[in-house]
Amino acid sequence: PGHRSPRAEKLLRHLQQAQEMARISTWTWDPETTLNTVPGVAWNILGLPADEVSSLSDEEYVERFVHPDDRALVLRTYAAVFEGQPDFEITYRVLGSDGSERTVVEHGETEIDAEGRVLYQMGTLQDVTERVRSERRYERLFEFSPVSLWEEDWSGVKRALDALGMASAEELREHLLAHPEQVAEIGRGALPLDVNRTTLRCFGYEDKRRFLDDVPKIRDSGNYENLREEMLNLWAGRT
């Protein structure tokens, strides 16, 4: 009793390897002992031995390792667990013992009894530094591209086109040519999410929010040829 089978040991090793590859660690907290259990990569992120990480209180962890600009957010989130918000997910920056800055996502779930007392907590801590860096690189490339770039949600347009029940692209083309007012109506379902600086210059705008608000009016200018072709490509799965 108490010993794991060879198969269980192998599965545990595979799980630990998968966590290390994903830069994710699990954690648990027992309010009776006030002990944290933090295996996996968490101590690698902070640059500390696992037993030292586990011995830290929430306040010590935040004070020693959370970026100063993120400490208030993290402490508020932890405190909210005892104020009726048992589950949480937050993104914040940590400073390793070597001075390196990492971005982590922490997710927590809490078991609470009928009187609102915390019985048990468990969660995950994942290092998402590289993902955040990639997102920032994409954002810079998008924003400063010399080509006009748009980010839009066309899912509503696709649903409206499918609802027409056309059997072929040619049948859909003929229908849209005969009903330009329907092209305009369906086109309003394309929700603008973002545009870059080049797009604003092309249309003579300085304020991005104002431009995004005006996109429906710009589309209703009467030139539906490009919009119709985009709809046909979307329906045919070419975009």
Image (tube, rainbow, N blue to C red):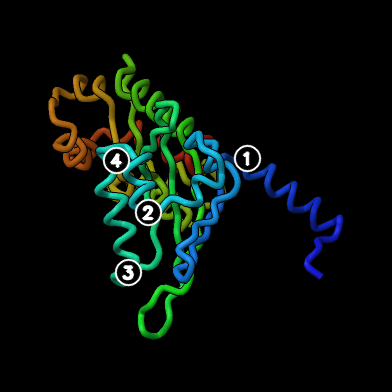
Q: Are marks 3 and 2 in contact (CB under 8 Å)?
A: no
Mark toward the start of the polypeptide (3 vs 2): 2
Q: Residue at x 26, y 33 (%)?
A: 223
Q: Is residue 163 above or below residue 25?
A: below
Question: Of the residues shown, which amino acid type is indicated by label 3?
Answer: Phe
Which is more foreground, mark 3 or mark 1?
3
Q: Nearer the viewer, residue 63 or 20?
A: 63
Which is more foreground, mark 4 or mark 3?
3
Q: Disc 4 and disc 2: Cα gap in Å? A: 42 Å
Q: Is residue 30 above or below residue 191?
A: below
Question: Of the residues shown, which amino acid type is indicated by label 1?
Answer: Glu
Q: Quadrant of residue 7 in the image? A: bottom right
Q: Residue at x 74, y 52 (%)?
A: 12
Which is more foreground, mark 1 or mark 4?
1
Q: Disc 4 and disc 3: Cα gap in Å? A: 40 Å
Q: Mark 3 = which residue?
A: 82
